[in-house]
Amino acid sequence: MKTIINGHEIAGRMPLFQEWGRRAIRGPREAKIQHKTETRRVMKKQPPPGYKPTGYGAAEWGKMKGKWGVEFHDCAHEAVFYPIPIQVGDIRVMTEPLKELHGSSYYADDGKPVFPEDAEWPLAWRWKRDFLTSIHMPHEAARTLCEITAIRVERLHNINCGDCYAEGAPFPSVADTRMDSKMARVSQVTDWFRGVWDSINAKRGYPWSSNPFVIVCTFEVIS
């Protein structure tokens, strides 16, 4: 059965985000940081040592496998195809935690009531507990829809300054055009991203220092 929200067919859910990430996706004014339009996630199955993605690592439709993914090779063995569950053009729901208040549902991040599409009243709370984590948010509570505009695979350390800003890194408070200041800003945003990455992925076995292959999803908010 297809899920339709605001006239869009929903392909699934976005990867889970921390609170600051959800705020950055909804808008920089709310988050007080740069608008987030990219996310990096570790490939669950890492290619063998020496293998590199074909071309620029852009995901494409694998005609032989009938799946969306990226092909890896090492110029000595047969290429290996790795499917990717998210596709360009997908419209996906950004999930959020919910809380109960006076029998109704509210978004935990900002305390706003949850209004399902075309509803006049907030969504009635129907769960036994008084808090739902993002992973349990029902589609009817969706208020942020994202369209996937590009997917590629690359090493984590390939991230550049612009990518860090797209990941939500804060802009410097003072503009300075000097070269030494520019280099300092590059180091600053890279250090910011490295800290964010390690806080989430180091305990999962993929610290910054391991430089794993990651899936880079670029997206835009459409609703």
Image (tube, rainbow, N blue to C red):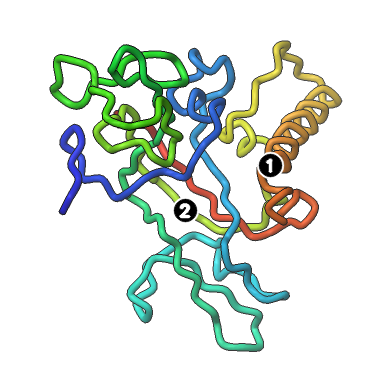
Q: Which amino acid type is shown beneath numbered disc 1?
A: Trp
Q: Which amino acid type is shown beneath numbered disc 2?
A: Ile
Sort mark 1 into few (<14), some (14-19) or many (20+) by Cα contacts within 10 Å.
some
Q: Residue at x 73, y 48 (%)?
A: 202
Q: Residue at x 34, y 39 (%)?
A: 93
Residue reaching furthest to the front = 128
Mark 1, residue position: 197
Mark 2, residue position: 151
Residue reaching furthest to the bottom = 77
Question: In x, y percent, where is residue 66?
Answer: 33, 75
Residue 22 vertical position relative to residue 202 in the rendered view, above or below: above
Q: Is residue 179 left or right of residue 103?
A: right
Residue 157 vertical position relative to residue 38 in the rendered view, above or below: below
Sort mark 2 into few (<14), some (14-19) or many (20+) by Cα contacts within 10 Å.
many
Q: Nearer the viewer, mark 1 or mark 2?
A: 1
Secondary structure state at the residue bearing disc 1: helix
Question: In x, y percent, where is residue 17?
Answer: 52, 36
